[in-house]
Amino acid sequence: MLVVLKSLYRSRASAFGTSIVLLFALLALIAPWVAPYEVNQQILEDARQAPSSRHIFGTDHLGRDVFSRVLLGAAQVLILAGSGTFLAVVSGTSLGLLTGYRGGWLDDFFMRLFDSLLAIPALLLALLFLGMAGPSRQSVLLVIVIVYTPIVARVVRSVVLSIKTKSFIDAARLQGETTARILFREILPSAIPALAVEASLRFSYAIFLISSLGFLGLGVQPPNPDWGLMVKEARAFVSQAPWAMYYPAAAIATIVIGVNLMADGLRKALQVSSDLHG
Amino acid sequence: MTRFLTRRLLFLGLTLVITSIIIFSVTQLLPGDVARVILGREAGEEALQSLRLELGLNDPALTQYTRWLGNFISGDWGTSYSTRQPVFDVVAQRLRNSLMLSGVILVLSVPTAILLGVLAGFKRETWIDHSISIGSLAVVGLPEFVTGLVLIELLAFRLGIFPANSSIRVTAGFWESLPMLILPAITATLVLLAYIARLTRAGVIEELGQPYVRTAVLKGLSNAEITFKHVLRNALMPTVTVVAISFGWMLSGLIVIENVFNYPGLGRLLVFAIDRRDLPMLQAIGMVTVLGYTVANLIADLLYTALNPRIRLE
Amino acid sequence: MEPLLQVDQLTVGYQSTLGIYEVVRNVTFEIAPGQIFGVVGESGSGKSTLALAIMRYLPVGGLIRNGTINFEGRDLSQIDLEEMRRIWGADLGLVPQDPLSALNPSIRVGEQIAEVLRRHRGMQDAEASALSMAWMEKVRLHEPGRVAHSYPHQLSGGMQQRVMIAMALCTEPKLLMLDEPTTNLDATTQATILDLLCELMEVHHTAAMYITHNLGVVAQICSELAVLYAGEIVERGPTQQLFHDPLHPYTRGLLDSVPRLGRTKRQVRVQAIQGRIPSVEALPTGCIFRQRCPLAIEICEEPPPLFMNTGRRESRCHRWEEIASGELDASQGASPIRPFKIPPPDEQPTLLVENLRVQFERSQNLIDRIRHRAGGSIKAVNHVGFDIHPGETLGLVGESGSGKTTTARAILGLIRPEEGKIHLQGQQVALKLAERTLDIRRLAQMVFQNLNEAFNPYMTIGEALSRPLIRLVGLPPDQVRQEVYRLLESVQLPAHYAERFPGSLSGGERQRVAIARAFASSPALLLADEAVSALDVSVQAAILNLLGELQAESGSATLFISHDLAAVGYIADRVAVIYLGQLMELARSEDLFQPPYHPYTEALLSAIPLVDPDAEKEHIRLSGDIPALTEVQAGCPFESRCPRRIGEICRDVPPPWQEGDRGMKIFCHIPIAELETQQARVFQFSDKGAPEA
């Protein structure tokens, strides 16, 4: 872990990205204590105030402190994107290991299913699902898992396919190792580099997806401090209070760029071939 | 070639069947009670029951699905719950607009992206490469609404070059709409540009490391011959596939962009239909989008196969 | 005569973050017009860097630090890129090791030849393609019209290399760089390509620098050669003298480490060179070979100059005069020759394989499966049967695609044969691995072919070795560690290697661990698949001896699989020759190398370049390349290339198994007695050529 972190700081770009990510994670962690205002605290007489010492990012049309909301929104989006990515990685890894190693009809079935899922543009699938199931944090989480599981599974599967023909797997079979041990001890470690890179990319796309859904009003619902949602709400008042729109937008841009730079550094450090599919 | 084509078409058919099942299940089975969705909360049990009968909602799921698919294939896409218009006509109109916008996006992004990618690949580890790489990393994952809003602020509000709003008449012609298409197209282009350029660069760098490049140099060929005849021919082949994949990206991006710019395409229709829970409309949009994406992939596959002699046609 | 190429004090370095490493140092030699000059070296010797530096084509970070490269009166090290472009392809050509990757995959091969002619001969399209056709005929590509319109991947390896040769020679350059041009080819193809190269270079009076690790090849085709070690030329001289009286201990060591065709381990023991080649980051002071040299004394801590004797010979050894006068024998420092003790074969074989048949289904996709369409099958191994007794080594020798590895995998249950019976210690075992108990699995273990894939890169050597002990032997956890150390010791590796990862081990060390792993469960049968092929010759010898010794101790039966007939003949007691999935001949090692042979064995023996420049040899060359398995007819699979083919019967009727003396068996229509009268001994070493038994 420390080694990876060190190698991330070897190039300027990935050091910058990693620092951004770490900074956001830290801010999200301490947000409840450092945010100057409650998340939905409305100070109506302060509505649409330009950034000042009282409200460093200004206030929105309802008099809510933009800085506090951006800060608390960070915690929300990082947790949601993080847990969604985590679950997708876990389910995708399990499916990828199993289908790749077993092959046969199981593999055929899941590959057809995944191909089909991937043939539906991610946002469309997410919107259809959320539109029908009703938008909520749980639905958004589920959507992230559904949309990204096939992608992770395909990455893992391709590693499995390249590893399972190697002779050390034959050696393990000759030694009578169990399938579980072959999958998790012999094959999985080889997939970790690709998986780490994929997970960081998925994390970035998850933030992308969550905020896009928020912006369309079909993700996390008001009055949550979701960045995309904040942009959407503030847009109607953009001529009077542009800061209420631009600060959350800037937050999204910064974290996404940070994660991308970090993922690229990770890819170079772990020498995973460049492949941004999906 | 015919065998290859039939196989590809069969796979395409299979994918479409599975996606149609997914779309049907998500839209028709998930909401629980479609009749209540249509009639609203206050509807009486009797009215609900009769509508269920009329729509065949009491039939087994499989029957409902095959009936729905049959209707869809025969062009009967139903009537919109919200506007009471035939879905086919509305979707066709909006599809035309979305295609118009996509065309502009592809024309803007693909050649530029390939040029940048090739440049970065050949000038590897120079300042040109670094600025292209870092620049593309910076925009590759940005949500379209963020870039869109920034562009509106800069190019529409501050500089006043393009209109901020792209709400054209639904039936407006291409040349009439073109000025309104530019800003949304630039927004989508930024993201695609980064994506295609990065993969093109990777392709060029990979080819440059191949031993046949050494052979070409040691034959005494000129730089131009080595670059254009030997390297680019191989390096640009995968780009065909990349463009097809980015087409899928663009479709996702269009949903957001059309909403940012109030552009009357499929994406805006989609959000509208979700708001109204307009099931036939949603199903049609879903199917049309998937069809477009898979066909684009098929074309890319065929092109790639035609270009690449290494893939043997059975 | 004025030399064509004169390399003087050439030093080549690589720039790394830690400084500049000099991978080639003070190299001096010359090549006369029309001469084939050999550069012999093991991996890490810097031989490819040397060739690329002379061609002025060094990768990023590579630079010529010192010295001159005089080529036809110009110093190539001083020439600019534009002038180099006029020399490349016109006066200086390259034939590399791997033709497939060296050819552009998406340009037709005819055009790839023609563009050189247009560039350097100023020809127009029609003229260039006509001449490129003519050259394809000269390199004996049949149907040049069809070949010219093919893409590289549509041609066989041998044909691809012919295209490369045509491409390099069509402008009639003065000098060719041949960088292991036949290393990836099968023995029979290699022989025809070497003949072709020599013939064409003689006709066009082309000189060549031939880079290889293969002592046999240089012995056959080079008039003079240099031995490169860790970036320095340690010895240089005319080929015959250098082979007969090497003046440097390293050359002696190399010659002693190669198994000679037809000599078994009972006659002469191959000698390994101790230690490993130093890395460029940690070169020893003084003589570069000092740490591994059996003759090293105090003076060797001084860097030796290049000594020159009265002939055209040079040696970079302080003690060359003692060696030359015969006072010192470089081999004497190594351990004495000791025959292996092998228990006599008893009644029950350890392994009995009967009628083994393996088919590969052509890949079927989902839709084919749904439509129940047979993908068609390829017979990879066809009715193979043999037995191996305790303590015995059976060699299985064959070229690529012959089904050697498939046979081994089928015996182990790693792939499922179509039919056949496998008996281990008299007990018939299930064909599927999943149905074999752990007790059965521990009976047969394998040393795998690919060294880089044999170990999980994320598992320490200790863990890798402990697994068979835990799973197969059922050792209690507290004894595992001790046993791992014992295993490491048995393959002469220190105990602390248990903590290391496979990536940090050299090829030879990895192979030792692989052998330790295979022996961990004390198997009755060991299958060694190309166990030494990926190793340098000096390391090869150590592994061959280690295998032999461990086997002698444990009394296990061994199936030794290789494409290298000399190595097989050395280690094996009996040899089975396999061609396209069909056993051709089975004979005792001593008998295999003298008539009567199967016609295929005869051709194979003739194709192998002998490590003796004066050896006499029958010249038998096979036409064409090894056919695809799909093209094999009902009869003898060798029929299409057999020089002794007697008629339609060979194609249509499977030959009988004829039995000869001492258990020898031949799969051929020609009666053994007739073969015996027709065939002569294929090769005869010169007396001085090799150390005698």
Image: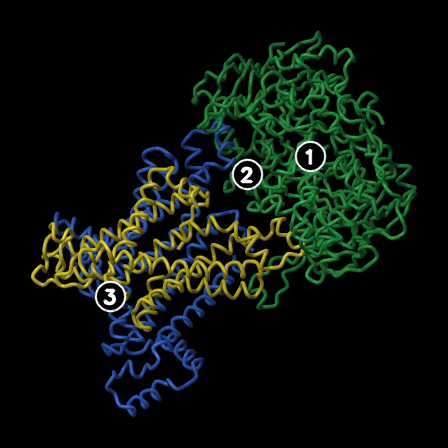
Chain colours: A yellow, B blue, C green
Question: Comparing marks 2 and 3, which lies closer to the viewer?
Answer: 3
Tag of residue A69: none
Mark 3 belongs to which amino acid? Gly
Residue A178 to residue A132: above or below: above
Relative placement, left or right, of A189 versus A248 is right
Q: Nearer the viewer, residue C562 or C484?
A: C484
Q: Residues within 10 Å of mark 2 (few under 14, many from 20)?
A: some
- Mark 3: few, some, or many residues within 10 Å (few <14, many ≥20)? some
| For marks 1 and 2 on the same chain, the one whose residue lies earlier in the sequence | 2
Quarter that holds the C terminus of chain B: bottom right
Which chain is mark 1 on?
C
**Pointer 2 indicates a residue of which chain?**
C
Instruction: Pinpoint residue A69: horizontal percent, then vertical percent.
Output: 21, 58
Q: Position of residue B59 (x, y in %)?
A: 41, 85
Amino acid type, label 1: Gln
Say whether residue C319 is left or right of residue C60: right
Q: Chain of mark 3?
A: A
Q: Amino acid at mark 2?
A: Ser
**Residue at numbered disc 1:** C190
Q: Secondary structure at mark 1?
A: helix
Tell me what residue is drawn at x 59 percent, y 36 percent: C98
